[in-house]
Amino acid sequence: MSAWKPLCAKKSPRGDPRAGAAAKRSVQRASKILLMSTVKRRTAAAIAKSAAKELQSLAEFMPNLADTDARTLALRLYYIELADGVSPIRARNKVSQMFLVSAATVKRWSSSWESIGEDALLDHRSEHEERDPSLLFGSPALVFELQSWIKNRLKQGGKHKDGYLTIQQLQNYINNVLFNDPDVVSPELLDLHDARYHSRQVSRMTVLRWMHKLGYKWADSSRAPFCDRHEDQDVVTYRNEWVKQMLALKPRLPILSEATGKPEWPNLPAGEKPLLHGNHDECILYANEGNRFAWVSDDAYHMKPKGDGATIMVSGVSVPCQGWLGLETIEPKSDGTWKHDNVMNNLKKVIDQFEHLYPGCQLLLTYDNAPSHTAVKKGSLSTARMNMTDGGKQPIITQMGWFETFDLATNSMKKVLQQMWYPGQDGTPIAKGALRVCKERGLKGIEKMRLDDLRALLASQPDFASVKPEIQQEAERRGHILLFGPKCHPECMHVEMCWAHVKQYCRQHCGQSITALRTSLQHALSEQHLTVKQHTAFSQHTWKWIEAYSHEADGVAVLGINSARDCNSFAALVAIAAAVLLFVVYGPFRCCPARGSPLGDFFTKWFQADIAARLAFLGKRRVIWL
């Protein structure tokens, strides 16, 4: 043991045995005053002002008491106990109870004192604010180089070859460039950093703290809230019917292997063809879109260009176990907008590619309800562009309509044909308006109806309702199946997750130019970035929602937990509790489902059992977990 033990081993400086006991009592009283202090870590020099009388008798026993802190008092009391013959374990326990620390902490303090001496008495906890950035602010050249480099990157924004600035890029620049320059970071500072953190490099969290110390923050441009029609009655009714159609076709789909992504074809009766499910959608990318988040400060930020910039529109079909089919890109500035004719040509291209790759199979296509998708063939019965009155710019409907009326002569219903136009004075056809068509059919209560109501009334008529969109007719003519998904349900379209994956990459590497966007889009659509295995996983993810919606009409709650993200943080647990409260108050709710992690799965099982019991009490018969 160092010089401390002989000093404490003495009963008293003057040889009086009673002086040691008095000193011990004074240390105990001083320690109690220390615990009463509002700041437990305050040094003994500050406490000595309120404990001068108790500490006065220790002036000779501990000559440097005014310069010591709580750790010094604890250590001296510990060695006084040892000098009185108390066992080390009991001494540590007594000191730990007095100073509200663990006995292991007292043991660590004494071991440090015996090994490194006076430095063990220094309390480094008050230096916590400066420990991490000490290397940063210890070198003014490092601060200057970092500020210059960061400001230059922020001004370039997405135009830089590496895209927007990230913490990983800054970490690599510091470790590989700045730390190798002795003019920026001296070897002495690196040695100090190595001695403190056992590394000559900075971690990701250290770089993140440095960014905040330098005045940068991760900012988001707020957007207005968006309300959709997800739970409107007409949407829910259509969704239930669509789910029944999809589940009726599911036995004909192959079982997709998550490991390889290859299909395992089912054994079907004679005459039935196996199906493959393809999901179509379009995606629009903008050259100036970029990331919503970026590092900014009061004097260094990158101004995004006004407007979205040049546009590229992509159309394609995502097929599990295959990938993309019928990929097409157009630039509206030069190629024009994506119209119904483009959709028809793209559908023919998709079917041609599918029949070449999978002869003898049938393609199940799902489209959303965009107007360019649901458009009917030119001249077919449609209320989309019908006016209230005759004439105008509404298209001429050449297809004959029909309606049923009661025939008194035969005492039965008969079908009456209706022409949707009439010739004008010069023989030019004039389209009939919605009001005239309804009057000719003998519909009642139409005089005060608005145009939208008249269109809805005519759309519900059997002849109008039986007209299928042109792309659906083309698919059925080629021997395939095409269905339109429910409105406001992107979770039922796995291609939406594919586009999200593509847009994430393009926003990071858009370059704020049409040339850079073309290059990044080509890579984002390639199999190297969006693999077949991911197409398969996205499709399986969607089918979980479809199966869950089939049970929701029976009073089953549909819940989803991302156990890797939501179950490993306290804030997420609070969010889950709030979601459960909303469920109790407002009824069924849904979150984005995802695959779990081992730690998250453990919590999820407990969470599921608890919530399932509560939902059963609320009248829900079963819970579907995604």
Image (cartoon, rainbow, N blue to C red):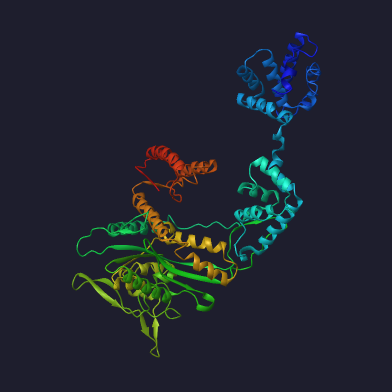
Expressed as whole percent of the image width and height from the top left, the position of residue 61 reads 78, 17
* Residue 148 in the image: above or below residue 128: below
* Residue 211 in the image: above or below residue 350: above
Q: Residue furthest left?
A: 410
Instruction: Using the image as rendered, state which of residue 306 and residue 450 is in the foreground.
Output: 306
* Residue 196 in the image: above or below residue 59: below
Image-based side of 16 in relation to 255, left or right = right
Q: How many marks?
A: 0
Expressed as whole percent of the image width and height from the top left, the position of residue 368 reads 41, 64
Task: Locate residue 515: give its quadrant.
Answer: bottom right
Q: Looking at the figure, which quarter contains the N terminus?
A: top right
Can residue 386 be seen? no
Instruction: Using the image as rendered, state which of residue 202 and residue 532 is in the foreground.
Output: 202
Expressed as whole percent of the image width and height from the top left, the position of residue 105 reads 63, 27
Task: Locate residue 160: give its quadrant.
Answer: bottom right
Can residue 288 be seen? yes
Task: Locate residue 191: give its quadrant.
Answer: top right
Q: Residue furthest bottom?
A: 426
Instruction: Using the image as rendered, state which of residue 6 and residue 289 is in the foreground.
Output: 6
Expressed as whole percent of the image width and height from the top left, the position of residue 14 reads 80, 12
Instruction: Using the image as rendered, state which of residue 418 and residue 289 is in the foreground.
Output: 289
